[in-house]
Amino acid sequence: MSKGLPKRSEDYSLWYNELVKRADLAENSAVRGCMVIKPYGFSIWEKMQAELDRMFKETGHTNAYFPLFIPKSYLSKEASHVEGFAKECAVVTHYRLKNAEDGSGVIVDPEAKLEEELIVRPTSETVIWSTYKNWIQSYRDLPLLINQWANVVRWEMRTRLFLRTAEFLWQEGHTAHATAEEAKAETLQMMQVYAQFAEEFMALPVIRGRKTENERFAGADDTLCIEAMMQDGKALQAGTSHFLGQNFAKAFDVKFATKEGGLDYVWGTSWGVSTRLMGALIMAHSDDNGLVLPPKLAPNQVVIVPIYRGEAELEAISEKAKEIMMALRSKGISVKFDDRDTHKPGWKFAEYELKGVPVRIAMGPRDLENGTIEIARRDTLTKETFQLSEMPVEEKISSLLEEIQKSIFEKALSFRKEMTTEVNSWEEFQQVLDQKGGFVSAHWDGTSETEDKIKELTKATIRCIPLDRKEESGACVFSGKPSEGRVYFAKAY
Amino acid sequence: MSKGLPKRSEDYSLWYNELVKRADLAENSAVRGCMVIKPYGFSIWEKMQAELDRMFKETGHTNAYFPLFIPKSYLSKEASHVEGFAKECAVVTHYRLKNAEDGSGVIVDPEAKLEEELIVRPTSETVIWSTYKNWIQSYRDLPLLINQWANVVRWEMRTRLFLRTAEFLWQEGHTAHATAEEAKAETLQMMQVYAQFAEEFMALPVIRGRKTENERFAGADDTLCIEAMMQDGKALQAGTSHFLGQNFAKAFDVKFATKEGGLDYVWGTSWGVSTRLMGALIMAHSDDNGLVLPPKLAPNQVVIVPIYRGEAELEAISEKAKEIMMALRSKGISVKFDDRDTHKPGWKFAEYELKGVPVRIAMGPRDLENGTIEIARRDTLTKETFQLSEMPVEEKISSLLEEIQKSIFEKALSFRKEMTTEVNSWEEFQQVLDQKGGFVSAHWDGTSETEDKIKELTKATIRCIPLDRKEESGACVFSGKPSEGRVYFAKAY
């Protein structure tokens, strides 16, 4: 039934790759590290985009578009920024091809060399702040609240569909403010928008936290993040929101006339989520039968499969099915009726399990006689027979979809709780990471040195300093030095 | 009032550039030929996207995403395709920067050279057909109806905001079919979708036509197009739809098992419109006071400007204004209330004229007393006093918006008629092109030779062979050789 999908317990990594391909989500292209997002995968991403875009607009942001290419010299203007990105930049050096003289095909025309090489944007702070310089003169021009949906390129050596690709799709918000306080509030707000999106729409519980200096965005003074737990016990950073201080304003000389008549550098933020969220969505909820989609992001929330022999049966079932579809659509539920005669019901059941359709309705001649339908839940793989006279079908399905959304979230939340372990000794730390994985909540002395050492020894990084952590003095699990509170360590994607 | 926008009659080109910048639509970036689409401009583009996307989905297409980069060797696989694009390709040759040894900043790391150079997509036929090879095995996999929203790069030497930029945003549909007939029907359908969009939403009358062999897309067997007339008498190609025959299927070896048990190459189409449509929208309708937007694409359809002295007056007007806003929004009309005290009403009037808001409502204390509002139309720059008791304000405005949409279209249509001249001699041809411009409807002998000669002598190209042209035998306006019907010549953007 599962079309031979590998089992999670046997090879999680292979299971993921196969699932992504077989559920028609994405595949590798001929260009190293660049993926093709297939129609079904893209329709899920479109639903994510629509919700996020709505949330950005509700918080006062507008969309704009900035160039794909960044002059090489721009990248260098912010010292730590260039250090963070220089090693993974795709560089455009020429702008023309010509026919090879030996007839071997086309070659790059050496005469069409660019005066200054261009970087394919790995992120757009530099090109955007160079533009903001012209847009901002006075406090009246602030705040500037802009978002961009775009593709970006980071030349990664080891890639993985959705999780780490050379080219990916994302949104990047870039805002400018008159005060540090306002910019910090924006940074926090956008992290909360991401957290709300992850929990309400992706059914993905996340830890709201702050990155350590080591893990901070290149060019930021502070990075907030949301961190999620995958089914294999590895953490995944699902979104980040950066307080940029005045770093980019200084690098690009963006000053504004203050209300008080002075002149000051502008304060900035940037924040982004990417198609990586697709990876998180898949890894967090899916099972050995395929994808499990939260109803709020499912392109089709319901599929109706008729079970019939011959035209007459199909016709009678279709009539009833169309009634049900009308009723569901009146409630804004998306529904597909699969009456293809080229595939058997069993094949269709497996197919929609693989594709993660939250609710499957099956109807045969007996159901017609009895006034029933069979309702199957994708998340629990359970079935029930529903008497149509019991209540309007749209109410039944609507509350079932809500229940599924909630239940997927709860399942992920209790898994995360189970996979979060407080440890108080180095031995315990290593043991938990080795044998169980998940988040390890431990005291840390606050130094990069310790953090590096732990990473070197265990491959675990500090995922974040949780924003809601309680003050608790203790001793660093590694160095024994004093600590003010626990942080989350984990191996991560 | 017009903030000193240059006049169309004095310098059309300067008028356009200034309008695009001052109305916050777009501006040039530091990277040659790449533009920044500013928030207001982008919000118009988003409205275009939303309508087009809906139309594509209604005609059975789904979105997907393919890589930005194309291996150089792919581009060469279709001979006429590479010939059409090789000269304007941005080429990625390296993937890393490093610090210069002399401390002069970052340089391209020569050791990080790509084995095969990558082209930044100028269009995606090659990368998509190389993918389709794996997606298509049998007639059951057809038709494949996919669209992509993406950025593309063509290294143009002379650029112009929206009209011709090195990077631009577009959508590109790429479909695969079992028969030539089906692919031709798709080609025609998508051209009609574009024409409908241009006329209904952009209020832009277009000629539906076929390109001559000279002007055909590189790699196509047939190119259909929509052509529009700008206010300076130059034509603008607003969208194209290509019948690709089996050219790309052969280049990428995409075969399918037919229903009859044979094996055949797949038939293809591709079709696209781009941010160039923004240029067409601006050039077709705007005037010396600024942008004129058709209501269906205006981010704000109505703006309400209060005219007041002191808090008490503002408060009374605001209350009424909010009532009106509620009423308008209940009809789906987008409305903005500009009660900023930092700017005077006259400044606001000029600003919203510049930005092309279709309807402006002004309200002062006298209006409150009399139960009236002042309604100003952007397209005609006319005003009327409206008695609120006459009819519900939402009905008044709703029918006014419809009238404006229609009236903008009619105006453009009668301008185009005026600017379309039938000529029957070479002398007349040259004279009309020189002194009047516009479309010149003339007989042509059907040869590329004559077409090239005419272009060389007059800079006019054949915009299209209109699909609805009547059979009419005549003599070619240039060569005197026999012709089967008239075609449209024009100087074009």
Image (cartoon, coloured by chain):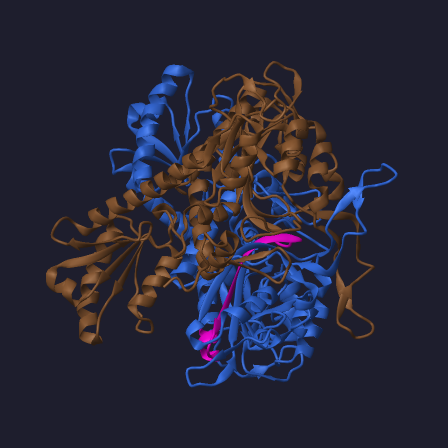
Chain colours: A brown, B blue
| Picture quadrant where residue B71 is located | bottom right
Position of B12 relative to A62 (above/below): below
Task: Give me the residue at 64% from left, 58% from top.
Answer: A32
| Picture quadrant where residue A413 is located | top left
Decide which of A296, B48 is in the foreground and name it: A296
* Residue with the most extreme front position: A427
Residue A34 lies, in percent from the top left, at 60, 56
| Picture quadrant where residue B376 is located | top left
Q: How many marks?
A: 0
Task: Give me the residue at 62% from left, 63% from top.
Answer: A30
Decide which of A177, A334 is in the foreground and name it: A334
* Residue with the most extreme right position: B102
Quadrant placement of the N terminus of chain A: bottom left
- Residue A125 visible? The answer is yes
Q: Is residue B25 magenta?
A: no
Task: Give me the residue at 67% from left, 74% from top.
Answer: B79
Q: Which residues are magenta?
A: B163-185
Q: Is residue B184 magenta?
A: yes
Residue A313 lies, in percent from the top left, at 18, 72
Q: Is residue B428 left or right of residue A397?
A: right
